[in-house]
Amino acid sequence: MIRVDRRHFENFDFVLLLLILLVCGMALFNLYSASYPPKPYGTPPYLKQAYFFLMGAACCLFILSFDYNDLHIWNYPFYFSVVILLLLSYVVGSKAGGAQRWIDLGFFNLQPSEPAKLMLVISLASYYSRKEVIDGYNLKQLIMPILLTGLPFLLILMQPDLGTALMLGIIFVSMTLFVKVKFSTIATLGSTALAVVVIAWEKLLRPYQKQRIQTFLNPEQDVMGSGYQIFQSKIAVGSGGKFGKGYMEGTQGHLHFLPERHTDFAFSVWGEEWGFVGCLFFLGCYFSMLLWGLYVAMNARDRFGVLLAYGIVMLIFWQAVINLLMILGFLPVVGIPLPLVSYGGSSLLTTVAALGILMNVRMRRFQTHNPQARST
């Protein structure tokens, strides 16, 4: 139900909005350079991304019109809708690069694994807020969160999309450790995870996935083949020097040495054109946005708001860290985008929707919360 209150406007988070607009503005300028010159056919990526930003803004306005505690109710249909979309991607999904991850909606290709990340944050926040345990969760109490994570994890892993599947695992670990887990439970889950990694390496990982990890450990062994992306990315970032080569003057990107320069390696283009100082400014704005998100979590009015805000910050933070370490050669290339920066409609809309929920938590921090009213 939509509720309008004058205090909603008084408590609107203009600081967070300013940081988001600043990051999105720099991202669009960078995408224009990364996709230049435009192809003689089709809509340029930067223009498509601008349309997605506008769609995301409309989505934010819709999200802000509702109390975030209504997500307790919407959580279940949202979860099953995403699971159905993941299943549909196997039936009607389009293929690219050996993976079947996208559903053609006409105006853009939806990648269901992207909203699955936000869906998991909402589901875990709802569960942990309703099933609070003072002395720490034991293994039995974590069965439901494990099942909530495991179903989409397996569906995404089968696409195959190892990077996104691992992100679901990282979200689960981040939020579960935050709510406090007994040490014996951590030891059990840790040893189980280690065993799964060994089995996955021997039985589940595909040859190209193993190759990515081997390339990460020794990228110089095949710089013209499997190590080409990381090698060219490191050259692009390193050649930027202190102040960069100038906007749209990057040679690695514009001479097409750098692959996927508008998606996974978008920040490599920024590093080459703006240099070390430009990277510091961009990352300062980006991580200030996330630090402010933690401030929102600390000042939320209830446990659900705290967990929602924290989970959203972790969702964006870990994707950003993995992407940045990936382009610098410290992690294997796993196809994790830099939220708000890498080109992609599904990723962008999911991230903007998540930030809309974060602003919703901040905007309603003055309200009192009646647990009994929300449990019915």
Image: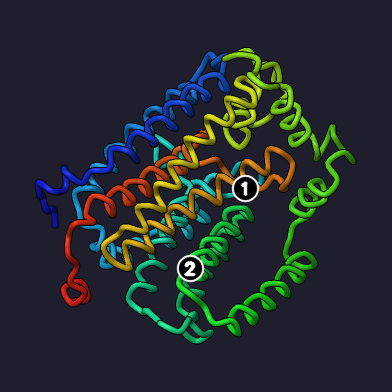
Examine the rendered structure and indicate whether residue 358 appears above or below residue 369: above
Residue at 45% x, 84% y: name it.
135
Residue receiving disc 2: 178
Q: Secondary structure at mark 2?
A: helix
Say which of 151 and 33 sits in front: 33
Q: Is residue 91 left or right of residue 79?
A: right
Say the numbered circle drawn on residue 322. Answer: 1
Residue at 56% x, 44% y: name it.
320
Residue at 49% x, 42% y: name it.
287
Residue 374, position as x, y percentages in the image: 20, 71
State the CA–CA distance, disc 2 to disc 1: 20 Å
Residue 294, position as x, y percentages in the image: 41, 53
Examine the rendered structure and indicate whether residue 152 appears above or below residue 10: below
Examine the rendered structure and indicate whether residue 277 appears above or below residue 195: above
Give the residue type that dot 2 points to.
Answer: Phe
Give the residue type that dot 1 points to.
Answer: Ile
